[in-house]
Amino acid sequence: MRSLASGLAGVLAVVLLPVALLVAWVSSVGTDTDRFVTELRPVASSPEVRDALADRTVASVQDQLNLPDRVAKQLEPPLRELVGTVLARPEVDRAWAAGLRSAHGEFVAVLEGERPASVDSTGRVVMPLTIKLTGLDQLLSRFGVAGDVAVAPRFQIPLFSADDLATARRTYAVGSVAGPAAPWIIVGLAAVSILLARKRVRALGLLGLGGIVASVAFSTALVVGRDEAAGVVRDPIGSAVVTAAYGLAEDGLMTEARTALWLSAGLLLIALIVGLVRVILGRRG
């Protein structure tokens, strides 16, 4: 019975190690909106996102103005030049940060069960973004469009699907009881396994080996998931945000996985050294 309990505690420690690392990171870092906004704010300055925003802004303005084709074609080059200038201004950066904050706040609220996901017509949580085109009135006056023109492109950038959030919410609900303390539960299970084991050195070695396997498997899954994350959203802007968010999570989780790997390797090394010493002492005896 004692050996069975030791083995069960050891298996649980190894199997639940990746889950504990994930839950601990999400609880302590993944729900930190300020850090999320800070880390993903530079995404708006990337050439791919800047070009996609420019294309979408120009198209939105043209749709809202609904000008004759001839005028619209003449307007497009100077309009695109104006949009490029506006996108480089600080107020767009602030609008981008506000959109990130709104999207992440929605994500955290859903994750913690405060409310159901607020999604668009495609079933995705969106990042809202409004761009104010200062100087548009002067530009339009050159093309015979007089008076104040109320045009402010508003975008809904698709991010996570409701199904993805539902899965994440269930996982978080299971682990949120432990939260940042989840790794210490793993340490407790490992300690119980060793204390109850009849052959403690062997139990120590098996835990170390199991921890190494679990850490490597977890790290491999993170690397494999990188490409999948990039294809979750077809929208180029949304894809850039999701990819950057995954990169933020991957960096933090890889750090935790490396720590778990080194600790596990340490346990295995201690077991090997103790076992070797026992063999040497036994031969001398």
Image (tube, rainbow, N blue to C red):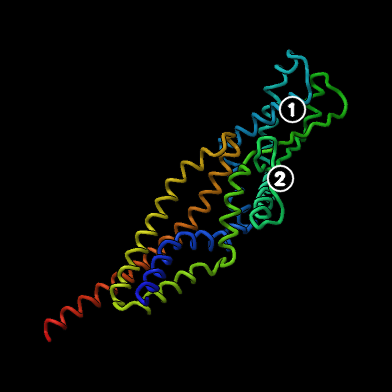
The x and y percentages for residue 137 are: 81, 29
The label shown at residue 61 is 1
* Mark 2 lies on residue: 118
- In this picture, residue 246 sits left or right of residue 85: left
* Amino acid on which the number 1 mark rests in the picture: Val
Q: Nearer the viewer, residue 68 or 158?
A: 158
Marks 1/2: CA distance?
26 Å
Mark identifier at residue 10 = none
Q: Bin the neighbour count of mark 2 within 10 Å (Cα to Cα): few under 14, some 14-19, many 20 and up.
A: some
Question: Which three-letter amino acid code belongs to the residue tagged 2?
Answer: Ser
Residue 254 position in % (x across, y down): 44, 57
> For the N terminus, which image quadrant?
bottom left
Q: Secondary structure at mark 1?
A: helix
Please say if 77 is above or below 112: above
Q: Quadrant of residue 208?
A: bottom left
Q: Which quadrant of the rendered structure holds the C terminus?
A: bottom left
Q: Nearer the viewer, residue 72 or 56?
A: 56
Q: Position of residue 55 (x, y in %)?
A: 64, 29
Q: Residue at x 37, y 77 (%)?
A: 2
- For mark 2, give the secondary structure: loop
- From this viewpoint, which residue is outermost toward the top? 70
At horizontal 37% and vertical 78% (from top left) the residue drawn is 196
Query: In the displayed structure, would residue 187 be above or below residue 33?
Result: below
